[in-house]
Amino acid sequence: MKKSTAELIIAQYEKYGEVFNQIIEISYDIDDPEVRKGIRRAAAEAQAALYEGLVQTVVKLFPDLDPHSSEDDG
């Protein structure tokens, strides 16, 4: 994989992160705690699956593209 392709994948993953965070915020308006819990769990599981499938694959090839690494490390 070219690094430019890997960078595009990470950029799209980060956009999804924003969407999942918005879903979590919206879920605070759900009165039923079981429904709220289900929505939050589904969002967390989807985000984890994307991280595992996309980010970890990219980071194995390009560790410097890890979106969770500290920018102060280098």
Image (cartoon, rainbow, N blue to C red):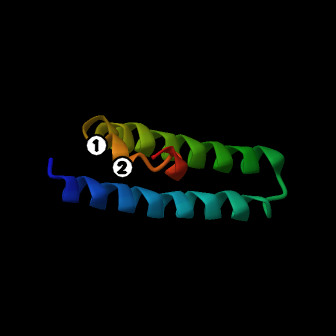
Which residue lies at the image location 15% right of the left edge and 52% below the top edge? 2
Residue 61 image offset from top left, x and y in percent: 25, 38
**How many residues crowd mark 1 within 10 Å: few (<14), some (14–19), many (20+)?**
some
**How many residues crowd mark 2 within 10 Å: few (<14), some (14–19), many (20+)?**
some
Image height of 64 relative to 52, above or below? below
For marks 1 and 2, give the CA distance: 6 Å
Residue, disc 1: 62
Q: Are marks 1 and 2 in contact (CB under 8 Å)?
A: yes
Residue 52 image offset from top left, x and y in percent: 41, 37
Furthest-left residue in this view: 1
- Judging depth in this view, the residue of 63 and 53 nearest the camera is 63
Image height of 18 relative to 10, above or below? below
Q: Amino acid at mark 2?
A: Leu
Give the left or right position of residue 22, taking residue 3 as reference. Answer: right
Which residue lies at the image location 34% right of the left edge and 40% below the top edge? 63
The reply to whether residue 61 is visible in this rendering is yes
Residue 40 image offset from top left, x and y in percent: 67, 48
Residue 70 image offset from top left, x and y in percent: 53, 47
Q: Amino acid at mark 1?
A: Phe
Furthest-front residue in this view: 74
Residue, disc 2: 65
Image height of 34 relative to 24, above or below? above
Which residue lies at the image location 80% right of the left edge and 64% below the top edge? 29
- Judged from the image, the secondary structure of the residue bearing numbered disc 1 is loop
Give the left or right position of residue 63, taking residue 49 as reference. Answer: left
The label on residue 41 is none
The reply to whether residue 69 is visible in this rendering is no
- Judging depth in this view, the residue of 25 and 38 nearest the camera is 25
